[in-house]
């Protein structure tokens, strides 16, 4: 294990003070018990919607700024999903990979090796048992901890990391339950640390293009959006032993709802200024029957029939509709088992234009007088105004500033087509500058909460479930996210 | 008006007896959509008991006939049906009716040119149709009028012994749907919904595949009526001809036009025949489209000046079925986007999506329709573009194989109007039950009222009425008709 490097963190003293309150002095004695997702606290329809009062002394973090820093020191927990983030950080000049952690030793060594190759510096490694991560978050030379572990570990790890003065970047879904979402919000507000959801899909080229257009008023009044996580994992990932299959499939055995809402919802929430001028009001959810996990298991007997007694309750296709405070509607789907190609749908409908993804298409109203359009071009919305090559050209002309700046580099470094890098660069750059990240703990909570809210709705016969307001009224006055660069 | 010809209808006597009860004597008052009776959410799903003496019509057969004599009411939407009828050799257009005399005359001319015979014409006032349905030489009355007229016209036609072919939507409320079901069961006349989209080339292709088990276990469908109908100056949704339709946007808040999408998905899933709609939950977006259209096209606000549009631009409804399947149904006719009915069917072994057409096939799909040597997986679309076209041609529905050439010639929404009309009229000719019955008419149309109710009540799930009164549990799925 490496010794802590000489900290050049400017708010080190403050953090040290927090730590000395006894919160992080010694993580090991109070070792976190392995969380069992079946013990998660699920709320009744009455309680799930309640907006909890802000504990005394806590302060909102939606405009939290921190001291600028020259170098951002990162620790990573969970190196299956986390590999890409380590790789991003190793390629960002102002980031330093200080420590990596995984329960599997060779994963930790593989990530460390990659960092050493790229930067010449070998990070500290923690591995081998389920509580190894507690040593990582107890270090005092880390600014931000990435949490990319199985879902049930997200919240305990994030809480502990914030308690010990670190910002946290949490993989999706940030939390499994609404109760957990409140814990994240409260801890972030208490410790005044960022707890951003690392929703890479918000940094996809198409998504940033749509966001860029939306911010310029191109779509007119926004009315409706659609999004999804449709990704056939039934024949692969969901059965992978020693990896995602072990824990991810488990959720299909006790929850029936949208198990993975944020990839679709994050970008759409940004288009619609959710949490910043608009807010989710309620959600209704309906699930189809379950077929494909069971059928694949019975036909192919993955892992030598080891799973033959598993009973899956999560409907193959879950469809939810969210209504917002401004009356807009969002349709959101989840299907990770059906025989169909990947899609996040990524649709945005306004009075002046409509965008759809998969494949990308843009229809422009005849009356749309936006300055980025050629005023001589006639168009009507009875066919797609821009698609294929024509759309590719228009997208290039109207690229989001972030993509202009680092899109090429992102493609080179990779990670879901480059969007992982663009996201990591941007999030770490926010910490470097000391500004509030584009995605805050309120986004983490709003987007992730749809998991339990949808499951609640399904369980209650598809009743509408009011969404709790994690900003506690803040959404009414918080300004929309600007066009960041 | 030409006098009734000598009838060769075999059940004429029975019908005359009905007519003789004096049912047609009282003129129908003009129906007012503002007076529609909407049930409370808790009552929506409550079935009406079947009145004594009524009998189900899901397997109703009639005497085969050589010629089908047709009357058509409403010649704006009805034009396509006129065109089909005159192109169908065993059909005779006996009478036409429209409020506007010139529309009636023009369609009579079409019939005369094509067949050499001039149909009787009824026009000029709002009750002219009553004379048409009172004739005793008609087998079928087409009803293609503004929505509020559908129910009274269909019921009167059935009362007077005619089958009623009813344009979409059939009933505006759940109670109207029950009224239509009860009339059909009482008078033992067919009342199919004229859902032309069930006879589209793609839809029949999907149905054909589905009936052969190609999709495996069905789990989910998606459909829509997304059609930007705002129009442009001189031909817009604000014009006088659209007054009746625009009015619904000032009165209702749900899916105003559910059947174009829902009909085909219901057929894929065997709804009413082995499965049934269980509940619907609906959410609407804000309204912008019509208000902004008026501000743009009619700044002086003319005839639509006092209208307040309450119907959200985009209505999204999820229907759950008794077998647990889900169906997304959308309605949007005022947004800037291309036409779509979505037409998505998701099963355990394949997925079809329309607009544009795409078909994904599971690696485990062992259907004999597939080349067993071909490797595939569902991570990309197995068939799209030219490759799908070829596969569609190879697996064309028998009805289309028979009718496609004619249909393209006759036209009407790319030919599907003709395929539908031919098929329906042919069912009556053979005396067999049409593919779509009054139960389909009722359950598909009822989504209008159910979605409106759900939206008004904060998007609660609203139980679906069972218009078959339990019949869906034992009715056999519609076979592959030909």
Image (cartoon, coloured by chain):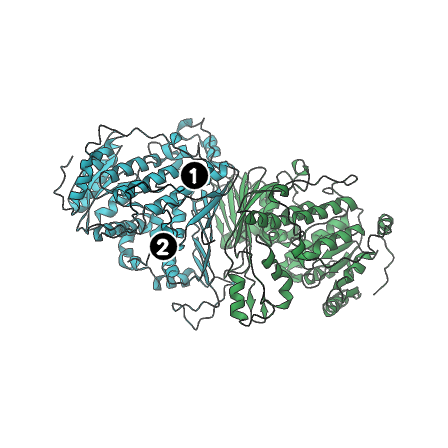
Which residue is at 81% across, 46% downward?
B63
Chain hosting mark 2: A
Tell me: B411 left or right of B118: left
Q: Residue at x 43, y 48 (%)?
A: A280
The chain ID associated with circle 1 is: A
Q: Which residue is mark 2?
A: A477
Q: How many marks?
A: 2
Mark 1 and mark 2 residues within 8 Å of each other at the beta carbon: no
- Work out whether residue B448 or residue B264 is closer to the camera in this orientation and state it: B448
Q: The chain shown in green is which?
A: B
Q: On the rendered image, what quadrant is the N terminus of chain B found in?
A: bottom right
- Between label 1 and label 2, give the one nearer the viewer: 2
Q: Considering depth in this image, is B158 or B398 the residue closer to the camera? A: B158
Residue B84, percent from left and from top: 70, 59
Any part of residue B395 in sight: no
Q: Colour of chain A?
A: cyan
Checking the image for residue A48, the label placed there is: 1
User: Up-down: is B101 above or below A242?
Assistant: below
Mark seen at residue A261: none
């Amino acid at each position: 294990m490496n010794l802590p490097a000489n900290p050049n963190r400017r708010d080190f003293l403050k953090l040290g003070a927090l730590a000395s309150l006894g919160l992080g002095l010694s993580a090991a004695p109070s070792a976190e018990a392995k969380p069992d997702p079946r013990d998660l606290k699920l709320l009744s329809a009455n309680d799930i919607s309640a907006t909890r009062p802000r504990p005394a002394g806590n302060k909102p973090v939606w405009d939290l700024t921190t001291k600028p820093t020259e170098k951002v020191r990162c620790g990573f927990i969970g190196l299956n999903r986390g590999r890409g983030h380590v790789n991003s950080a190793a390629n960002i000049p102002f980031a330093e990979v200080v420590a990596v952690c995984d329960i599997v030793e060779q994963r930790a060594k593989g990530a460390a090796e990659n960092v050493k190759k790229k930067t010449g510096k070998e990070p500290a490694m923690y591995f081998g048992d389920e509580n190894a991560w507690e040593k990582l978050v107890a270090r005092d030379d880390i600014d931000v901890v990435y949490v990319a572990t199985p879902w049930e570990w997200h919240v305990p790890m994030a809480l502990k990391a914030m308690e010990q003065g670190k910002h946290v970047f949490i993989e999706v879904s940030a939390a499994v339950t609404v109760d957990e979402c409140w814990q994240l919000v409260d801890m972030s507000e208490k410790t005044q640390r960022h707890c951003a959801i690392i929703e890479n899909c918000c940094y996809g080229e198409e998504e940033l293009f749509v966001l860029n257009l939306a911010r310029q008023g191109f779509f007119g009044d926004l009315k409706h959006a659609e999004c999804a996580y449709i990704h056939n994992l039934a024949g692969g990932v969901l059965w992978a032993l020693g990896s995602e299959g072990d824990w991810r499939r488990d959720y299909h055995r006790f929850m029936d709802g949208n198990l993975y809402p944020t990839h679709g919802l994050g970008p759409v929430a940004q288009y619609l200024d959710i949490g910043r001028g608009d807010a989710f009001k309620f959600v209704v959810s309906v699930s189809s029957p379950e077929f494909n996990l069971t059928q694949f298991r019975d036909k192919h007997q993955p892992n030598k029939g080891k799973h033959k007694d598993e009973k899956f309750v999560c409907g193959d296709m879950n469809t939810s509709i969210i209504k917002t405070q401004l009356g807009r509607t969002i349709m959101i789907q989840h299907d990770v088992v059906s025989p169909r190609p990947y899609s996040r749908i990524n649709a945005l409908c306004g009075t002046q234009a409509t965008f759809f993804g998969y494949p990308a298409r843009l229809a422009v109203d005849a009356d749309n007088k936006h300055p980025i359009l050629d005023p001589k071009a006639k168009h009507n919305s009875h066919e797609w105004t821009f698609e294929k090559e024509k759309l590719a050209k228009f997208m290039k002309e109207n690229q989001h500033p972030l993509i202009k700046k680092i899109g090429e580099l992102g493609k080179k470094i990779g990670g879901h087509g480059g969007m992982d890098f663009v996201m990591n660069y941007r999030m770490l750059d926010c910490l470097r500058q000391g500004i509030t990240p584009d995605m805050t703990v309120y986004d983490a909570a709003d987007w992730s909460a749809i998991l339990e809210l949808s499951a609640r709705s399904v369980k209650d016969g598809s009743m509408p479930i009011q969404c709790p307001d994690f900003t506690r009224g803040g959404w009414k006055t918080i300004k929309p996210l600007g066009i960041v660069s | 008006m030409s006098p009734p010809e000598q009838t060769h209808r075999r059940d004429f006597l029975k019908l005359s007896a009905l007519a003789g009860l004096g049912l047609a004597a009282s003129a129908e008052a003009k129906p007012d959509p503002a007076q529609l009776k909407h049930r409370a959410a808790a009552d929506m799903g409550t079935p009406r008991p079947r009145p004594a003496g009524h009998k189900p019509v899901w397997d109703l057969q009639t005497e085969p006939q050589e010629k089908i004599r047709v009357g058509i009411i409403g010649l704006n939407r009805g034009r396509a049906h006129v065109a089909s009828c005159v192109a169908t050799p065993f059909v005779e257009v006996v009478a036409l009716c429209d409020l506007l005399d010139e529309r009636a005359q023009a369609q009579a001319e079409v019939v005369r040119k094509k067949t050499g015979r001039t149909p009787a014409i009824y026009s000029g006032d709002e009750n002219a149709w009553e004379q048409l349905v009172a004739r005793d030489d008609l087998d079928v009355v087409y009803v293609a009028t503004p929505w509020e007229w559908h129910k009274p016209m269909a019921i009167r036609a059935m009362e007077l012994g005619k089958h009623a072919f009813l344009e979409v939507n059939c009933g505006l409320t759940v109670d109207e749907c029950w009224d239509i079901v009860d009339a059909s069961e009482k008078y033992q006349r067919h009342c199919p919904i004229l859902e032309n989209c069930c006879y589209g080339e793609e839809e029949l292709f999907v149905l054909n595949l589905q009936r052969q088990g190609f999709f495996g276990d069905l789990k989910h469908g998606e459909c829509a009526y997304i059609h930007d109908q705002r129009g442009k100056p001189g031909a817009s949704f604000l014009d006088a001809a659209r007054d009746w339709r625009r009015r619904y946007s000032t009165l209702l808040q749900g899916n105003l036009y559910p059947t174009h999408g829902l009909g085909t998905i219901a057929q894929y899933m065997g709804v009413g025949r082995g499965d049934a709609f269980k509940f619907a939950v609906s959410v609407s977006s804000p309204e912008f489209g019509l208000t902004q259209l008026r501000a743009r096209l009619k700044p002086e606000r003319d005839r639509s000046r006092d209208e307040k549009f309450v119907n959200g631009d985009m209505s999204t409804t999820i229907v759950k079925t008794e077998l647990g399947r889900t169906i997304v149904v959308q309605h949007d006719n005022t947004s800037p986007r291309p036409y779509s009915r979505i037409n998505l069917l998701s099963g355990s072994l394949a997925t079809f999506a329309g607009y544009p057409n795409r078909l994904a096939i599971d690696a485990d799909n062992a259907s004999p329709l597939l080349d067993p040597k071909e490797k595939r997986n569902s991570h990309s679309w197995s068939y799209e573009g030219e490759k799908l076209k070829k596969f569609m041609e190879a697996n064309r529905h028998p009805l289309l194989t028979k009718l496609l050439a004619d249909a393209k010639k006759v036209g009407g929404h790319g030919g599907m109007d003709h395929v539908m009309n031919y098929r329906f009229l042919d069912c009556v000719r053979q005396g067999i039950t049409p593919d779509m019955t009054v139960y389909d008419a009722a359950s598909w149309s009822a989504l209008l009222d159910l979605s409106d109710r759900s939206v008004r009540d904060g998007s609660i799930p609203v139980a679906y009425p069972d218009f078959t009164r339990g019949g869906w549990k034992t009715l056999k799925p519609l076979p592959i008709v030909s």
